[in-house]
């Protein structure tokens, strides 16, 4: 089953870390990424650009309107994601807990759906 692991953090949180902490964390990310790639469970993923670059489309009186920014009702913003193909929800959660980001930020684990709305 495929799951998306959504990583949320405060914009600038990574940059706020000391240089040594950032370098260490990047090494941990590299090890983590190699492990889930080697297991065959990694499907894809990416970091996202800063929220200042985002545009949000919402309907206003039934007409789509675009505005600057994500404007989420939280300080944390979606920072990146992984898509994994695993045997169970428990394994998807396990992978999320292995991600070094899980020690500092939140990771939402959610099943992906196919084009007709059923879990993949």
Image (tube, rainbow, N blue to C red):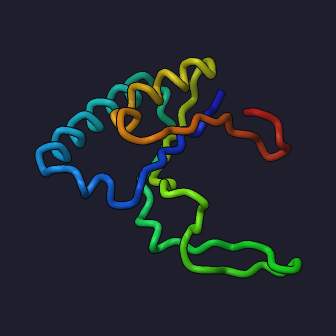
- Name which residue lies at 46% across and 74% down: 53
Which of the 4 quarters of the picture holds residue 36? top left
Is residue 50 found left or right of 108 in the rendered image? left
- Name which residue lies at 47% across and 67% down: 51
Nearest to the observer: residue 18 or residue 120: 18
| For residue 87, above or below residue 84 | above
Residue 99 lies, in percent from the top left, at: 38, 32
Residue 70 lies, in percent from the top left, at: 57, 67
| For residue 33, above or below residue 50 | above
Nearest to the observer: residue 55 or residue 116: 55
Residue 49 lies, in percent from the top left, at: 42, 64
| For residue 39, above or below residue 46 | above
| For residue 64, above or below residue 102 | below
- Name which residue lies at 73% across and 33% down: 120
Which of the 4 quarters of the picture holds residue 87? top right
Is residue 73 found left or right of 43 in the rendered image? right
The reply to whether residue 33 is visible in this rendering is: no
The reply to whether residue 112 is visible in this rendering is: yes
């Amino acid at each position: 089953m495929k799951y998306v692991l959504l990583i949320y953090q405060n914009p600038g949180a990574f940059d706020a870390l000391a240089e040594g902490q950032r370098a260490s964390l990047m090494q941990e990310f590299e090890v983590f990424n190699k492990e889930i790639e080697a297991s065959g469970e990694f499907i894809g993923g990416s970091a996202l650009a800063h929220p200042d670059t985002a545009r949000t489309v919402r309907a206003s009186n039934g007409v789509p309107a675009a505005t600057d920014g994500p404007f989420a009702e939280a300080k944390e913003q979606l920072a990146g994601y992984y898509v994994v193909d695993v045997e169970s929800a428990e394994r998807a959660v396990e992978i999320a807990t292995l991600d070094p980001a899980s020690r500092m930020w939140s990771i939402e684990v959610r099943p992906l759906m196919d084009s007709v709305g059923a879990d993949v």
